[in-house]
Image: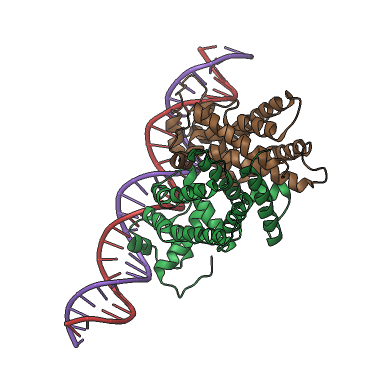
Chain colours: A green, B brown, C red, D purple
Amino acid sequence: MSQGNKNDPTKKRILDEAEALFAQKGYHAVSVREITAAAECNLAAINYHFGHKKNLYLEVFRSRWLPRSRRVRAHFSKSLTSQKAVSPKAVARALAEAFLMGPLSDEERQRHHQLMVRELGQPTEAFEMVAEQVLQPFFKGLAETLRAFMPEDMEEERLLLNALSMFSVILYFSFARVAVTRITDREYDEQFKALLVEQIVEFCGKGLGKSY
Amino acid sequence: MSQGNKNDPTKKRILDEAEALFAQKGYHAVSVREITAAAECNLAAINYHFGHKKNLYLEVFRSRWLPRSRRVRAHFSKSLTSQKAVSPKAVARALAEAFLMGPLSDEERQRHHQLMVRELGQPTEAFEMVAEQVLQPFFKGLAETLRAFMPEDMEEERLLLNALSMFSVILYFSFARVAVTRITDREYDEQFKALLVEQIVEFCGKGLGKSY
DNA sequence: TTGACATTCAAACGTATGTTTCATATAAAT
DNA sequence: ATTTATATGAAACATACGTTTGAATGTCAA
């Protein structure tokens, strides 16, 4: 798995492999033996370094997922502020690029979104962390950004729903690869991802814009 | 769980409870003992009626998920054909209503979409069935419907991507209840669901429309 | 009443699970 | 050199798992 970095300290290797496996197969489908085998360490190492399995899962979110989330958000903010005129399409593009191409490797991105969707579907303790430290502030901020070009009297609630709508499209195209591949008959190569970004910019750009 | 219909035959009770549990917690997080306890039957009943656990999961899709999917699609088709002028918003509304209010009970809908997202995230044998019998024909059909009001020269690929985009918003608002609730601070009552439909119609309607 | 069939049941099977134990190794501090 | 703290190792623990077994029920035609 990953790169078998036998140089890395055990604790790091465990986190790496645990994250990959949890994302890929879900918490219950992964055994601690599977993780320690992938991390090439002793069975007891997990309980030594993390106490128990559940806490390892939480630690994956604490020390891996959250920081990565911040990186993505930073990327998004930066490409937004580097523009003068803030338009619907500009926001959609910045968002789509941050989440679909952005600062993460393809593998990282897949893991990241899979872990997220798992928590969305059946929240565990980790969800509390994610919601509080990432989702809430991110969508509040995004809603504020949208206010710039949306009708002045639009309530915050509607702004939030627009932010969520835009996000949902991006998340779907990243998460539901298998289905998208199956339906469009296209692989997720760079060319197709660029096309996806264009699609998202078009669709969400118009979706956020005025109706005529 | 559900309604404890001790009158129903064992096989049906098992399917009912298995579907609810698989949707709620995922395949690996549910034990056959948990299912038989919920279905109030003997442990061996699952292996007697379905052979083994994996096949029960598949049977849930075969005999429950697929038919329900057809019901939703029928509802959508019907409310589409009952209109004269096919507009972006009309399609978005028919779709949003079919998936968010439509012919399913709230409980059914939640199960339905959770099972679906699970298969999207990590396809099992069931995905083959779902893709072939539902996803492919549905999105092909939806793309054809869109053609009516989209630029004539638009390739099928782009039509499909638009169909997928629209669908992703709907799926998200149905699937990610916890997050939506958390972020908007609103419960999923009838009023809020109506608001969601309006949001989707607005957003996707414009997203599908011409850009000016 | 008999026999054949379908279904349910309690009990057990073998294996996999998360976790613990305790002995050993490594290396820095005294 | 001895102690101390940190980390790894092999083995075992108790429990939970999916599945199988074979006896006990019920059902209904012959």
Left or right relative to B160: residue C10? left
Left or right relative to A88: residue A60? left
Depth order, front residue of B139/A42: B139
The percent position of residue A151, horizontal first and vertical second, equals 57, 41
Of all residues, the one furthest to the front in this rendering is A152
Left or right relative to B149: residue B198? left
The percent position of residue A89, horizontal first and vertical second, equals 64, 51
Rendered position, B40 above or below A53: above
Residue at left offset 51%, top offset 26%: B10
Residue at left offset 37%, top offset 61%: A46
> For the N terminus of chain B, which image quadrant?
top left
Depth order, front residue of B170/A14: B170
Is residue B130 among the parts visible in the rendering? no
The percent position of residue A200, horizontal first and vertical second, equals 65, 50
Is residue A155 among the parts visible in the rendering? yes
> For the C terminus of chain B, which image quadrant?
top right
Residue at left offset 51%, top offset 70%: A4
Depth order, front residue of B92/A16: B92
